[in-house]
Amino acid sequence: AQSVTQPDIHITVSEGASLELRCNYSYGATPYLFWYVQSPGQGLQLLLKYFSGDTLVQGIKGFEAEFKRSQSSFNLRKPSVHWSDAAEYFCAVAGYSGGGADGLTFGKGTHLIIQP
Amino acid sequence: IAGITQAPTSQILAAGRRMTLRCTQDMRHNAMYWYRQDLGLGLRLIHYSNTAGTTGKGEVPDGYSVSRANTDDFPLTLASAVPSQTSVYFCASSDSIADTQYFGPGTRLTVL
């Protein structure tokens, strides 16, 4: 079974500073990887996804992520954070049993705090 | 386009009662999913459906049942609610595994 680990429960970053959120996955085949963001009291919004091809993927709101197969990682980055980036961030891997989509396996999330 | 709607928005329920959470999508997606979100645990898959007429169990299916009579609707039923089912429930849909999952706004359920 697949799994996702987000090692950092909380991260505090100053506004304007760079950001990197870590994600490690375990999956037997080529993974489909996602980053979602959840603002307080809201649903989940997709930031970006990786299926194949270029290992550096660009997303919305200035985010990017790099897939590194050798490290089983899919870390999320942003060069300069804004106060509006404060939210919960979830990394996820898609499961596939051969009969179709089995849903996403999520990490436990990283809570991002932005300091003024 | 509404996307995914969930009802109710929130509900307080007595233990032992039956409850159905509703989910409707208007994107004609083949696959639909139910997740529960608990603090410190992230989102966990309860049940899924790859296409109308088929369903499958996720990571935490016990105490829940689903049906998929048509493409658009995917109700989640708690036959006899227990306090451990207090959670926020999210419905999602996608066209396939290679597609983005779109999430509904969630239902906050409290079981007393």
Image (spheres, coloured by chain):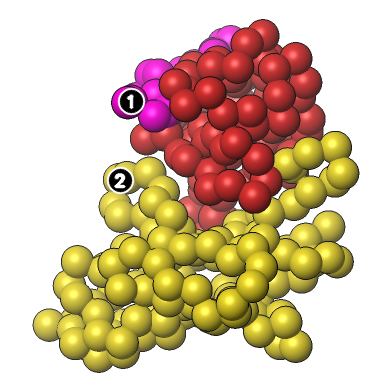
Chain colours: A yellow, B red
Q: Which quadrant of the figure contains the N terminus of chain A? A: bottom right
- Residue behind mark 2: A41
**Amino acid beneath label 2:** Gly
Question: Which residue occupies the extreme left position in the image?
Answer: A116
Task: From this view, report whether residue A17 is shown above or below residue B101.
Answer: below
Query: CA–CA distance between discs 2 and 1?
Result: 19 Å
Q: Residue at x 53, y 62 (%)?
A: A49
Task: From this view, report whether residue B76 is shown above or below residue A19.
Answer: above
The numbered disc on residue B34 is none
Q: Element under label 1?
A: loop
Q: In screen coordinates, is A23 left or right of A90? A: right
Name the one closer to the observer, A24 or A59: A59
Q: Identify the image quadrant of residue A51.
A: bottom right
Q: Element under label 2?
A: loop
Residues packed near mark 2 inside 10 Å, few (<14), some (14 to 19) or many (20 plus): few
Let me know if residue B52 is in the magenta part: no
Q: Which quadrant of the figure contains the C terminus of chain A? A: bottom left
Name the one closer to the observer, B15 or B54: B54
Q: Position of residue B45 (x, y in %)?
A: 65, 42
Q: Residue at x 70, y 17 (%)?
A: B52
- Residue behind mark 1: B2
- Mark 1 belongs to chain: B
Residues shaded magenta:
B1-20
Residues packed near mark 1 inside 10 Å, few (<14), some (14 to 19) or many (20 plus): few
Q: Residue at x 42, y 28 (%)?
A: B4
- Mark 2 belongs to chain: A
Task: From this view, report whether residue B53 is shown above or below residue A85.
Answer: above
Do we see residue B19 in this rendering? Answer: yes
Judged by depth in the image, the label closer to the viewer, 2 or 1, is 1
How many dots with numbers? 2
